[in-house]
Image (spheres, grey):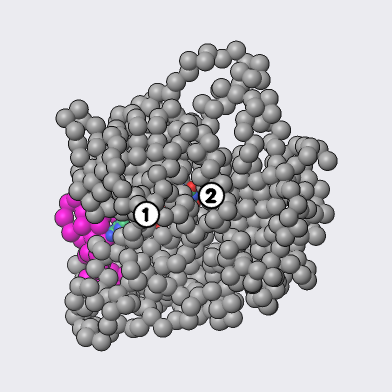
Amino acid sequence: AANSLHYTFNNNFQPQQHQIQNQQQRRYSTTIMKPINTALPDKGARRTSQSGNRNPGKTLPQGRNSLESSTSDSGINVPPFNHPHCDRQAMYQQPVRKVKPLRGNYDYDLVVIGGGSGGLSCAKEAVAHGARVACLDFVKPTPIGTKWGVGGTCVNVGCIPKKLMHQASLLGEAVHEAAAYGWNVDDKIKPDWNKLVSSVQNHIKSVNWVTRVDLRDKKVEYINGLGSFVDPHTLSAKLKSGDRTITAQTFVIAVGGRPRYPNIPGAVEYGITSDDLFSLDREPGKTLVVGAGYIGLECAGFLKGLGYEPTVMVRSIVLRGFDQQMANLVAASMEERGIPFLRKTVPLSVEKQSDGRLLVKYENTETGEIDSDVFDTVLWAIGRKGLVEDLNLHNAGVLTHKDKIQVDCEETTNVPHIYAVGDIIYGKPELTPVAVLAGRLLARRLYADSDLRMDYADVATTVFTPLEYACVGLSEEDAVKTYGAEEIEVFHGYYKPTEFFIPQKSVRYCYVKAVAQRSGEQRVYGLHYLGPVAGEVIQGFAAALKSGLTIPTLMNTVGIHPTTAEEFTRLSITKRSGLDPTPASCCS
Ligand code: FAD
């Protein structure tokens, strides 16, 4: 039956070619669309017994599977990771490897390790093209015992609960603004943390349920077990009921990451992370948020909006990796709302006092001054680590880089039948839509004869702080590094959202900028927006930027008035001119 089936994408078309012609100019050829009507090859595969360790092989000693360490004493044949660096140029210049997965004598064609954003999309797409797929997912509880269901970080302890709590905090602000707009509102409104947590958790549980039903309907075998390699084609799954051995032709590693804890006394015993916050069974109260990456700032932002007292502790810079002018504006806008930032400061210890509150000692790294304060909650947001440890990757010969896995332009590890997608891969944006698309495209290349590879450049993103920040493309500093300061023109402007006037909200940090090529066609390299509904604003511009947006096109685009997105079409002042970028009026 599989032979006679014809597998098609939704619209019967797939982009066949998407070439970059000139990386400097970053111009694309038009996508040629061709109908596809691809019959899958005869499966002809037999299932092995569940115990089949066909190729036990020898193993690399622990700790010998890092790219940084020697691999020469390996017991098994460990192919080196010698693929060229996968940038956009490499991606479009190298032909796609046409490696058809062989349907061998394995339990499954594909086993995906990790049932999060990347793993699920890959597994579902692979079965849609006829592959026999199992997907393992297992969540180790946090030190305080928080655990969750299938779906990975985004659904359970990431994007979704974060966005819901951000929304809860914005609504509190909106209720206060409503009074200025003429609503009779009780000014004693206050949030109910337990109710919020239970609403958020109910939503998450419904998503967990839908995910499991979807996997069953789509015939992906979901295995609730912790996977670790026994040999390059064999996995051991630790289940509640005992261990199970699974063999597969191909593996996709999509295990994501978990928050780090600092190595200081009391950190693990008394601190929590974002993995615990969204289901915390008590009000967070006065909270020390350690770390000023996007997760730390977002948590501090919604905690403040919900009426708690967050303080942000910053070791070095805010929002590392983002445009630093914008990052500092985000921090300043939070400080303006009453969120203190302890800069150049690191925590030293956390102690529980007799009243149950937490005494935190910390040090200013510039002055060496040691200080302390008492908090109800300490939230570590100091970064995330890839979950490579449990995988026993040395048994499969897969090399790691730090706690991540390095892959080539086709998400292949150094072992040709083992791939990786999502947060676990080294040096790529750690975002849900990135993991989802990479997983889907990989499955199409493996099982649907597709040529399309994931383009990791120009991925738009948003920081959901009280005043949101969204961007796509290069930061100003990266543009200067890449092209030189003389070749870059930065258009910028402050603006006043119409809806801010009546409630007299601060417009001080509402700001947009476009980083562009100075001469020639004036290609836009990066767009940055600080203001309301930032994600909604930047998403469309991301498509424009990927399609080769130029400054003249932006300026000749008619805005939608009165919106904040139209501010991009009104940009006319360059930083180089030194002119005042503050607006005179709203409508001219
Ligand atoms: P995950 O979703 O983490 O899934 C991996 C799964 O594999 C997990 O369930 C894990 O428990 C499981 N697993 C691990 N090891 C094994 C093993 N050995 N065997 C079996 N299973 C295993 N991204 C956005 O795009 N927008 C946002 O607004 C956003 N907000 C975020 C907010 C927070 C607080 C956090 C923490 C993240 C946020 N992210 C956001 C990032 C996003 O959640 C991740 O990029 C995304 O979930 C990565 O997907 P993944 O498939 O790589 O891994």
Mark pair 2, 1: CA separation:
19 Å
**Upstream in sequence: badge 2 or badge 1:** 2
Query: For the point 20% across and 73% down, which residue is it?
Result: 62
Would you name the residue on which mark 1 appears? 366
Residue 55 colored in magenta in the image: no
At which x and y percent is residue 143? Answer: 22, 45
Q: Disc 2 beta carbon < 8 A from ligand 1?
A: no
Query: For the point 24% across and 68% down, which residue is it?
Result: 392
Would you name the residue on which mark 2 appears? 328
Label at residue 388: none
Query: For the residue marked with disc 2, what is the amino acid?
Result: Asn
At which x and y percent is residue 203? Answer: 42, 35
Task: Please identify the residue farthest to the bottom as the structure is shown.
Answer: 72
At which x and y percent is residue 418? Answer: 37, 72
Query: For the point 40% across and 30% down, which residue is it?
Result: 308
**Viewer-nearest of discs 2 and 1:** 1
For the image shown, how many numbered marks are present on the structure? 2
As rendered, which of 246 and 48 lies closer to the eye? 246
Looking at the rendered image, the quarter that the C terminus falls into is: top right
The span shown in magenta is 222-248
As rendered, which of 94 and 43 lies closer to the eye? 94
Query: For the residue marked with disc 1, what is the amino acid?
Result: Glu
